[in-house]
Image: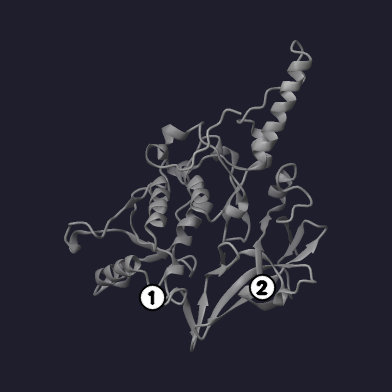
């Protein structure tokens, strides 16, 4: 259909003038935690389900057939990638908001202007003016997150520069909680170096002036909620240098994210995720649906997941909230694929697109 598929969006392509009205992002909501997906949200480009491509192709085939049959009186218009109705029914969520447990759809008023998060408020992206020190376990992983931070208006501070330590200043440190114990036995050298640097900077300084160490999920939520989220608003954002959890009892840690090994790769789960699961992975039973309410790490070995059950009605409605909702505890081995829960309004707008009735992973919230 004449488009070009880009494997990478780096360098000059991160500039608004080089992508506006040119770059579209096509994917599936199950890819919401990949770098490309988060970068698309940071850039403010139109984000569309893969079904958008096939729908445009089908319309183009109908258009060609109409022209062949009678070129003088075309009954079908040529498809347009800027069709607002097509966008409305095929747009992707920016991600899962931990504020309300729902997936937040990209809004048309932002997509049609290729508007980056925050620019609709004061003309600047959400990280404008922020200096951020970043340390992740893999160099390529870190480079991709540098692109995301810069797309959001932030600047990266290199603590390995030739400057004296006292002259290196930044507003916050960003790491991945999964690179800290108990997820790993030893912190990666890059991460350990940054955490030690921050500890030296914070030594002898009042708490109100401490440089915060934040999890990547904070940056992701800034993209999803299109604002600079207060990192005191949720206990999962701020990390300790020693481990990724909060100790609630002797030998028991409260976690907020885990990775579970699958056949081909590892899947990340976080508190607040809605998921399919099978208790004891019984093959003869249909999977249940629930929301992860808590994660616990026992005795450095076992991880237990607390699930709030969600009742399915009419094939697409999930009863959410109310009194007496049962909670059960399962093993991480019982976790299955993620599901998307949308507000009633958003689900209806997507009902003619990818969230059609009978979808196996998209549901509508029904308040109890």
Question: Residue 166, image x and y in percent?
Answer: 18, 63
The residue sitting at 64% across, 31% down in the picture is 83
Residue ranking furthest to the right: 314
Residue ranking furthest to the front: 263
Residue ranking furthest to the top: 72
Question: Residue 261, image x and y in percent?
Answer: 57, 68
Picture colour scheme: one colour
| Mark pair 2, 1: CA separation | 27 Å
Name the element at disc 2: helix
The answer to which quarter of the image holds residue 339 is bottom right
Circles 2 and 1 in contact, beta carbons < 8 Å: no
Is any atom of residue 76 visible in this view? no
Indicate whether 245 appears above or below 171.
Answer: below
Is any atom of residue 46 visible in this view? yes
Question: Residue 174, image x and y in percent?
Answer: 38, 61
Q: Is disc 1 surrounded by few (<14), some (14 to 19) or many (20+) residues within 10 Å? A: few
Indicate whether 344 appears above or below 58.
Answer: below
Indicate whether 351 appears above or below 180.
Answer: above
The answer to which quarter of the image holds residue 317 is bottom right
Indicate whether 291 appears above or below 328.
Answer: above
- Which residue position holds label 2? 334
In front of the other: 2 or 319:
2
Q: Is disc 2 surrounded by few (<14), some (14 to 19) or many (20+) residues within 10 Å? A: some
From the viewer's perspective, tell me whether residue 309 is left or right of residue 213: right
- Which residue position holds label 1? 186
From the viewer's perspective, tell me whether residue 355 is left or right of residue 229: right
The residue sitting at 53% across, 56% down in the picture is 33
In which quadrant of the rendered image does the N terminus lie?
Answer: top right
Q: Which mark is residue 354?
A: none
Mark closest to the chain's N terminus, 2 or 1: 1
């Amino acid at each position: 259909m004449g488009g070009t598929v880009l494997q990478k969006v780096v360098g000059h392509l991160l500039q608004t003038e080089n992508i506006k009205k040119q770059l579209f992002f096509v994917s599936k909501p199950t890819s919401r935690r990949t770098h490309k997906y988060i970068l698309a949200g940071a850039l403010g480009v139109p984000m569309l389900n893969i079904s958008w491509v096939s729908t445009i192709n089908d319309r183009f085939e109908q258009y060609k057939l109409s022209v062949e049959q009678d070129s003088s009186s075309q009954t079908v218009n040529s498809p347009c990638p800027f069709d607002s109705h097509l966008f409305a029914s095929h747009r992707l969520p920016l991600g899962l908001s931990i504020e309300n447990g729902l997936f937040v759809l990209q809004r048309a008023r932002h997509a049609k202007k290729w508007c980056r998060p925050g620019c609709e408020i004061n003309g600047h992206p959400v990280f404008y003016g922020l200096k951020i020190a970043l340390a992740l376990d893999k160099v390529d992983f870190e480079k991709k997150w540098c692109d995301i931070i810069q797309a959001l208006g932030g600047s990266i501070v290199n603590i390995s520069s030739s400057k004296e330590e006292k002259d290196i200043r930044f507003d916050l440190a960003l790491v991945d909680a999964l690179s800290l114990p108990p997820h790993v036995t030893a912190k990666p050298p890059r991460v350990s170096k940054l955490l030690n640097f921050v500890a030296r900077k914070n030594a002898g300084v009042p708490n109100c002036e401490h440089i915060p160490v934040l999890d990547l999920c904070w940056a992701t939520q800034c993209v999803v909620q299109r604002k600079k989220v207060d990192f005191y608003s949720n206990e999962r954002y701020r990390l300790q240098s020693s481990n990724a959890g909060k100790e609630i009892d002797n030998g028991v840690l409260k976690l907020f994210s885990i990775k579970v090994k699958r056949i081909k790769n590892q899947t990340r789960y976080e508190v607040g995720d809605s998921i399919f699961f099978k208790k004891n992975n019984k093959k003869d039973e249909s999977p249940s649906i629930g929301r992860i309410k808590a994660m616990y790490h026992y005795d450095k070995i076992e991880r237990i997941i607390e699930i709030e059950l969600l009742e399915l009605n009419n094939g697409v409605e999930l009863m959410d909230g109310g009194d007496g909702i049962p909670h059960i505890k399962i093993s991480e081995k019982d976790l299955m694929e993620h599901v998307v829960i949308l507000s009633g309004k958003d689900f209806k707008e997507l009902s003619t697109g990818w969230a059609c009735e009978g979808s196996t992973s998209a549901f509508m919230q029904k308040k109890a």
